[in-house]
Image (cartoon, helix red, strand yellow):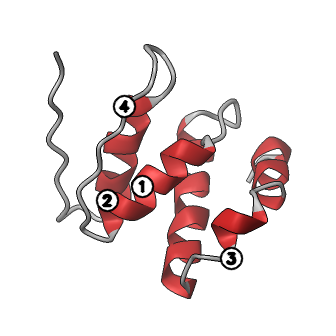
Amino acid sequence: MSISALNALENLPANFTNTLSTIQIQQVLEAFAHLDFVSKGTKIPKLFQLKALISLLAGRNVVLRAATGSGKTLCMILPLFLSPDKMAITVTP
């Protein structure tokens, strides 16, 4: 994993990581690893992306509102890498 991804992992807010189960922590690590590989170390997931990812992998419904270019698409793609049996349906105005 790239240095930027490792630094981002170390700097995740404690109030986020303390609430995760062992499986969810593993999923976050896998998400970082996949994104790091695909982007060749140039991108790291944002906290809202990780929260959406964990919720999607847990089978919960997610309503995500974020600005254009902020990284919403990544929230829909990463679960497919980690769990191919999951599906994301996107509704846009």
Among the two numbered marks 3 and 1 on one chain, the one whose residue lies closer to the N terminus = 3
Q: CA distance from mark 4 to mark 2?
A: 13 Å
Mark 2 to mark 1 CA distance (whole Å): 5 Å
Residue type pointed to by label 1: Leu
The answer to which quarter of the image holds residue 89 is top left
Residue denoted by label 4: 73
Amino acid type, callout 4 = Thr
Q: State the residue position of label 2.
A: 56
Q: Are marks 2 and 1 in contact (CB under 8 Å)?
A: yes
**Can you tell which quarter of the image residue 75 is in?**
top left
Q: Secondary structure at mark 2?
A: helix
Point out which mark residue 53 bears: 1
First in residue order: circle 3 vs circle 2: 3
| Amino acid carrying mark 3 in the image | Asn
The disc, 4 or 3, on the residue closer to the chain's N-terminal end is 3
Q: Which mark is residue 18?
A: 3
Give the camera-side residue of 14 and 71. Answer: 14
